Structure formats: structure tokens, C-alpha cells
Amino acid sequence: MSRIVSFPEPFPDEDFRSVLYRYHLRSGNPEFVHTQYELFGRRTYKQKIIPKGLKLMLDKLPLGHTYSAEEILYRYTWYGLCKSFLTFERNEKWFHVILHGSNLRNAKGQPPLVGKKSVLASEIKYCAACVLNDLKTYGEVMVHRQHQIAFLEICPIHLVRLHSECPKCSYKYGNTQTGVLLRTSQCKCGYYLPNEHIELNSVYQQQIDLFNDLVYIRDNQNKFNIDTTIIKFMNQLNTQNFITPKGTILKRELLAYFKSAYSNIEIYKFDELDMKGDYFRTYLFRRDHMVNFIYFYVLLARLLCGSFRSLVETDIEYAINIPFGNGPWACKNSRCLLLDVPRVNRCVRNVNDSSGVYSIKYNCEICNYTIIIRGNKTTCSKRKIIKGVNKTVNAINELNDARHEIAATSEVKFEHKLYINRLRMGNLLNERSYRTRSEIRNQANYLYAWLMHYDKEWLESKIPLKVERKNTKLNFSSIDQDLQQKICEAGRSISSDYHLPIYRGTILGKLSPLDRNRFRKYCCDKLPLAVQEIDKFTETKKQFLIRSIPRYYSKLKLGNASRITISQFKELASISFYKNGDNEVDEHIRKFLEEKGNLI
């Protein structure tokens, strides 16, 4: 494995994406995709918020380097923040993906890094004051890690508004899709990065306070984990009466209190999270889903304790003394021979959630009394027991008689229900004719299932015969014509500048699972029209290169005065033109450049 000659030293609090781009500028690679392939072995332009394949990159660094995966993740990314809300098992899987890359089979366990549930911004943001300061101090622009929080609108240091795109031409300063980042204090249109100082008000101050909580979590992730965090929350919720004596969290009351306290919740862009949804309420305070609601937990910590740091550092015991002790307990029956003698070691405990009153119940085998102690109140009642063989036999006979009476009553009720359900099914079948049993089931699922279970013989005589699956015949001629039309529509829906080769799987991916499976199963001998139609849209690697010439040309952004050769175009466009191209592809490139007036 060949090593690179040098790698830039990261600046303080620099986002690792910025470090990679500064290496790209020094590497001499024509496009960022070549740098990605050189360092990570991936042909992609996209920059990941948390890098993947770090081990391969570390193995390619110059001899004697002092980098480690942990140092990169903790000092130059927001990995520490996400890790604090992940279980140990899920973090192990994610760290493996970060080290060795991912594919469809081993990418499970990754937290949401972009989107509504993420605290990290999907677009790269810059502060004009920081950019000018970096140019003066380091001689080049970098991406600051602290600015890449979704809700943060101003720089916490300079109080200058953060920008992700040019106000004049809407050009993105940091394009995560192409990997190209800001290099100067000017946009490509010549417009300077706006240096707009913001007057600090309560909204921005709350944003900065919340940001400081996130920084504390990120930088102190080794001091606590998800289990200790949940315990701290439970302690605070119990102290503020959001947990019942039985241990149930009063989620409805808690969320109502939360919403009333954060009536201006939109300032955190938290309004996108649906707190009324079943998903949110179901998985609240669940270990495996904590990372999905980082916003909520940090805001809740501020509401309960003032800050997340106070939540972690406050020691409150979530425990009470065991009501009525561990025994033994004494009989309270005044007629008992062992009155007030502690000797009963087994009891049943209970607590009333609404009143919060604890109680225990135990039995005295001497006097056959049941004692219930509820709070400060004690009651005694005689246990109903049957003594002697004759009494036992009589009791059994009484129970049998009662069972027969209940059975007779139940049989009368069942006969009545059977009559009613038969009548309902008869009326349903008389309304219209049904060709299959599925139609009847769809029309009256419960009635069909009940009669099939309790009166199958009668129902079988009334409904259509069951058609075995093996006897079902498909009309392949009709299916073939239908698939031909659907494949034609799917193929035409693919844009001419689609960035990948068009294979059969590309077309089939746009069909329904039923149509996709039918084509794969019967395409060899049953569906000639569908096969003929799909082959019209599929292409070879060479055809893909010819189709991609305009797309690569638009990325080069050559002016009228710029002229290049065919070889230069292939070098700037993609290495695939050398691997899969030939004279025919070169001829198409020549004709295209001649039409554009850029051919030397």
C-alpha cells in the first residue's frame, strides 16, 4: 500500500471535512473524488459528517504520524455528542463502520446524523469574522466545528450571523455533494461573505446556552454514559413528581409541562419533531432510541436542572424506605392467640398511583384472618375456608352445579349468536354474487372468521369453492403487455443525465414488488415483450460513458476561451474513460467538443 507524502495539521476546533479539503488542495488531484479514492478507497464526491474508512486513511498517512481514529473523532468531529446517547452495543457497531467503512450489510446501528432528528447541520456554515481571522492567522479558510449545529444562527464568539450560501447568487459556500469548500472570503461571483453583527437577545442567548450544553456533552463523554444519564433523569423526574409510586412515567403531564415552558420552541427548530406522535411517546427514555431525541433530552435537562451539566453532577437518590419494613409482621386480630407477635414473613404489597398510599396484605394461619395495612389504617377480615370432608364435598358439588348452570346459559347465548351470524352472512351473500372467498373476507372479515371457526361446515356450503394456488392460471399474454407498458414508463422517467449506468435492475427498481418478481421469474420464456422493452433502456459501460459526456462537461465549467484535447477531457472527467472507453467513445468526445467550440 503506497503512502501519501504529507498531510495537513488540523487547526484548533477544525471540522475534519475541512482538513480533508485542505489536503485535496495540496494533493494536485483534479477533483475531490480522486482524493476520496486515494484516502478512503471510495469513488464519491460527498463529504461525510463523521468519516468512514478511517483505518485505510491512517494506513496511508506518512510514516511517523501521530494521528489516531479516536483523536480525529473526539477533537475534529461531533462524534462524542452522539456517542453519549448510544448504547454500548450500538456504539461498537458504529465505531466498526467508522474504522472499516460500510455497506448494506454492516451499516446498522448508525445514528441519524442529518435530517429532522439530528442536531448537526446538513449544510456547512461559515462566520465571516472567523474566516477573516483564519486568513490572517493561518493564511487559509477552514470550517469551524462549533458552527455546524442545526439550530445555531450566530457565531458564539463573534455574534456574527452564520451563512451557508451566498445571499446574492445562492451558491453554497460548502457543498457537501461535491466536497468543494470555501477557499477565500469571497463567493465565486465576487460577493464577500456577509459580516453581519447581531444584537444578542433572549432567543440567541438561549441558542448559545443550548450550544454550550452540547459542547459539554461532547467534551465530557467519558464521564457518563446512556445508563447514568437515564438514572439522572429518573431521579429528577421522581423529585418533581413526574413518576408514580409504581414507577410509571407520567409522559402526558411531562410533555404538557415541557411545551408550556418552551412555548417558543421553534427557535431551536424543534417544532419539526412531532411530540404528539406515537413513535415519540413510545420510545421516550428507551435506551436504544435516546440518540433520536437529543434535542428533547438536552432541553428537558435545562428545564429540570438549569443545564445538562447540573443534571449529571447533581446527586439525588431515587429511592424510598420500604413501606412497613421487611417483616416479620404481627397479627392484628384481637382474638388471635398470638396477637402482636411478629411471625408472618410473607406479604403482598401494593400502591395506589392516584393517592400514593402504600399497602400490604398478609394472612394469619392461627386465626385464619387476613390483615391489610393501608397507610395508617389497618383492617382485619376472616378468611373464608371450608373445614371437614363433608363440607368440602358439598362445596365441590355446589361448584359443579354452578358450572353446569353457566354452561347452559353460555350455550343458549352461543346458539343465539350462531343464528344471528348465519342470518348476517346470508344477507351478505344475497346482496350480490361473490366470485372468490377473498371478496367475502374483505367485505366482512370478523363475520367470515367467526363462522369459519365455529360453523365451518355450514359456511363451506354457502360460499364459493376454495381455489388451490397450484390450479391458478396466469394470463401471461396480458401480464406481458402490462409489464411492457410499465417498463416503458419507468425507462422514460429516468433522466438523460442519470449519474449511473442503466441496467435491468435500475428499471425494475421503479416497478412494484409484484411486477418486479413476475419479471424475474418468468422473463426467460413467458414475457418476450417485456424483455424486449427493458433491453431498449439498458446500456453497456461504453454507452454509459457516451451518455455521460455532457454531464462531465457541465462539471468542468469551461469558458469560451478554454480549449482542451480529448485526453485532457478524459483526465478531468473520470478515470472510467480510460478503463471502459475506446476509439468510438473518443470520437463522440471529439464531436461534442467541436460542437461546443472547445476542442484543440
Image (cartoon, rainbow, N blue to C red):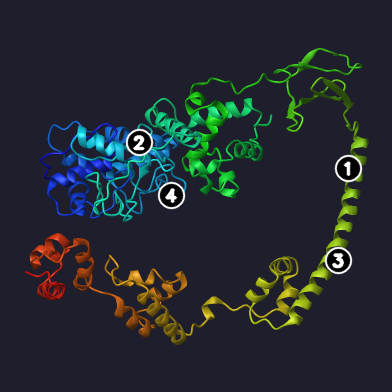
- Residue positioned 29% across, 71% down in the render: 502
Q: Distance between the Cα atoms at labels 1 and 2?
A: 78 Å
> In the image, is 30 to the left or to the right of 303?
left
Q: Which residue is mark 2?
A: 146
Q: Nearer the viewer, mark 4 or mark 3?
A: 4
Q: Distance between the Cα atoms at labels 1 and 4?
A: 67 Å
Judging depth in this view, the residue of 475 and 145 nearest the camera is 145
Amino acid bearing label 2: Gln
Amino acid bearing label 1: Ile
Where residue 593 sits: x, y (%)? 13, 72
**In the displayed structure, would residue 211 be above or below residue 472?**
above
Q: Which residue is mark 3?
A: 416
- Residue positioned 58% across, 45% down in the render: 275
Which quadrant holds the C terminus? Answer: bottom left
Q: Distance between the Cα atoms at labels 2 and 4?
A: 18 Å
Can the viewer see residue 43 in this picture? yes
Judging depth in this view, the residue of 484 and 8 nearest the camera is 8
Q: Earlier in the sequence, mark 1 or mark 4?
A: 4
Q: Which residue is mark 1?
A: 396
Amino acid bearing label 3: His
